[in-house]
Every structure is written in structure tokens, then in C-alpha cells.
């Protein structure tokens, strides 16, 4: 997943973002700036900057963390070089907004796969971890500040800068989708005076776990129990029908859950 993710991020930069001169953040954007001042190929600059950041992480953070960035540090510049030599997507320049949507989506998909593979893209990630370790600055804060400074320093037109921001927004949305993909679960909250019967139904017939929460009714002020359970989408209809049969006046709330960790989900029930 890390390798495929780096291929996709390189495609987003090499096919669309760099050829169309959209503003871009991160180490790639920084190297684009340096490339305007130093007559060194962009790929070489990426290796140099990523190498320096890798060394900083190695000595100031931990060997375990930086080793996760090693694959990206070595492969991304190489894939980017190949992507920049292919010009089959230049026709997309006729529709810059569509280009930003495609670039942001591909970039988000690639970045999401890298994260799902328990890897890191390196770059400003490393600076963020260093700042958090020694100065207690949130990792995301330094990354956002770094990206903003790099984008504003590139002296693109206002339109191309705006397109760069659209790419970042699209990338963030897709990363969240990729990280939560395949986890189709819902949280069901059940408020009923027949909570004991509903508990028996959930545990014995619906094969789903549940938790009691102590509560007090708002109107009468009576002490009661609230049932909360997390279950796959496929069981929602059956649970709703069973609860309605036990107590037609039960109050049921169903919400989407993006991620579930713990016994019965990421850990064995036994």
C-alpha cells in the first residue's frame, strides 16, 4: 500500500499539479521553490531535502518512526521523475477546475493508502513530530503553517493559488474516506423502560454486544438505563424490528460510525 500510495501521489504531482503550475505545499512545493533558485533537477532536490529531514528524524525522534518514512523518501522522487516525463494529461489544462478535483482525489487516495499501510510520507510530517516532541506544538499546526508558507511563497497567480487550496481540501476529504473505507458500522442508542428484555434480545438473538449507560428521564426524572451498541449495517433492520416488537414506544437513535476498535471488532471476542 505504501508503494502504490507513492505512485499515486507522484502521478498527481507529475501529471497535473506541476505541469499546470498549481500552488503546492509540503516538501514538493518547497523543492519547486528551491528549483527556481538552484539549477538542480527537482528529483535531486527532493532526495536532498527528504534526506536531511530523514536524518533529523533519525537523531531527534526515533529510529522506528523514521524507518516508516524510508520507503517514501526513496521511492517518491523516483516515481515523480517518471511521471513528469509523461505528457498524456496535458489536455486537462483546458479545464483547470476539473484538474484540481482529479489531482486532489488522486493525491488523497495515495496519501490515504500510505497511512493505511502504517507508513509516512515524510517531509513536514517529521518536522511536525520533532516540534511536538520538544516544544509540545501540535503536529497538524506545524504542517498547516509550513504548507501555507510554502504555497504563499511560490508567487503564483491568485487563481493558481486558489486551485492549490482546492487540491488540499479535496486531498483531505479523500484521505478521510480512504482511512475509514470498509468500516461500515453504526452506533445504535436505545432508550426504553424495557431495557432488560432488549438486552437479552441483543446478546442472545442479534449476536451483538451492548453497554448500559445510567440515565434519568427528562420529564418524570426517573432513573433508567440507556443501551448503546455498535453493529454492522446488515443488522440494523433486524435490531429495529426486534426493539419495536418489545417496546413500540422505545426511542432509537442510529448514527454512522467511522472507526471501531476493541474486543469483538479489532480484537477477538474470546
Image (spheres, helix red, strand yellow):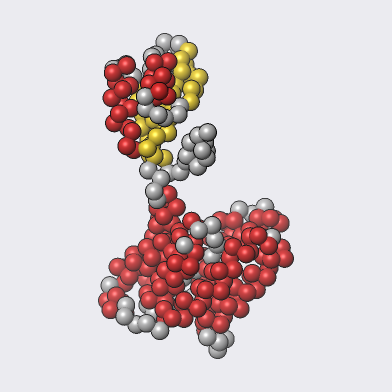
- Quadrant of the rendered structure where residue 178 is? bottom left
Residue 270 is situated, as x and y percent measured from the top left of the image, at: 52, 33
Q: Is residue 252 left or right of residue 60?
A: left
Which is more toward the observer, 218 or 2?
2
Q: Which residue shows up at 30% across the image and 29% down it? A: 238
Q: Which residue shows up at 34% across the image and 19% down it? A: 250
161 versus 205 height, above or below: below
Residue 162 is situated, as x and y percent measured from the top left of the image, at: 39, 67
Q: Which residue shows up at 42% across the image and 68% down it? A: 8
Q: Is residue 19 left or right of residue 126?
A: left
Count of picture labels: 0
4 versus 117 height, above or below: below
Residue 19 is situated, as x and y percent measured from the top left of the image, at: 39, 79
- Quadrant of the rendered structure where residue 249 is? top left
Q: Residue furthest bottom?
A: 39
Let me know if residue 110 appears in the view: yes
Let me know if residue 261 appears in the view: no
250 versus 208 height, above or below: above
- Quadrant of the rendered structure where residue 60 is? bottom right
Q: Which residue shows up at 37% across the image and 43% down it? A: 184
Q: Residue furthest front?
A: 270
Which is more toward the observer, 196 or 99?
196
120 versus 34 height, above or below: above
Amino acid at each position: 500500500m505504501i508503494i502504490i500510495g507513492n505512485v499515486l501521489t507522484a502521478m498527481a504531482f507529475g501529471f497535473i499539479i506541476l505541469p499546470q503550475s498549481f500552488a503546492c505545499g509540503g516538501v514538493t512545493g518547497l523543492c519547486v521553490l528551491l528549483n527556481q533558485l538552484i539549477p538542480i533537477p527537482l528529483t535531486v532536490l527532493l532526495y536532498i531535502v527528504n534526506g536531511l529531514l530523514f536524518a533529523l528524524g533519525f537523531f531527534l525522534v526515533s529510529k522506528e518512526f523514521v524507518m516508516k518514512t524510508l520507503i517514501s523518501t526513496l521511492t517518491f522522487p523516483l516515481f515523480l521523475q517518471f511521471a513528469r516525463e509523461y505528457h498524456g494529461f496535458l489536455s486537462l489544462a483546458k479545464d483547470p477546475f476539473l484538474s484540481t478535483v482529479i489531482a486532489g482525489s488522486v493525491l488523497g487516495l495515495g496519501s490515504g493508502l500510505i497511512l493505511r499501510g502504517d507508513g509516512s510520507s515524510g517531509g513536514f510530517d517529521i518536522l511536525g513530530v520533532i516540534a511536538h516532541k520538544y516544544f509540545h506544538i501540535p503536529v497538524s499546526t506545524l504542517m498547516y503553517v509550513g504548507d501555507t508558507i510554502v504555497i504563499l511563497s511560490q508567487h503564483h497567480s491568485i487563481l493558481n493559488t486558489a486551485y492549490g487550496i482546492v487540491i488540499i481540501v479535496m486531498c483531505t476529504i479523500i484521505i478521510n474516506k480512504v482511512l475509514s473505507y470498509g468500516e461500515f458500522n453504526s452506533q445504535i442508542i436505545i432508550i426504553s423502560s424495557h431495557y432488560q428484555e432488549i438486552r437479552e434480545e441483543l446478546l442472545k438473538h442479534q449476536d451483538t454486544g451492548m453497554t448500559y449507560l445510567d440515565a434519568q428521564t427528562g420529564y418524570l426524572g426517573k432513573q433508567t438505563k440507556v443501551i448503546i451498541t455498535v453493529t454492522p449495517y446488515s443488522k440494523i433492520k433486524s435490531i429495529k424490528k426486534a426493539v419495536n416488537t418489545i417496546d413500540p414506544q422505545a426511542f432509537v437513535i442510529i448514527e454512522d460510525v467511522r472507526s471501531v476498535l476493541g474486543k469483538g471488532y479489532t480484537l477477538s471476542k474470546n
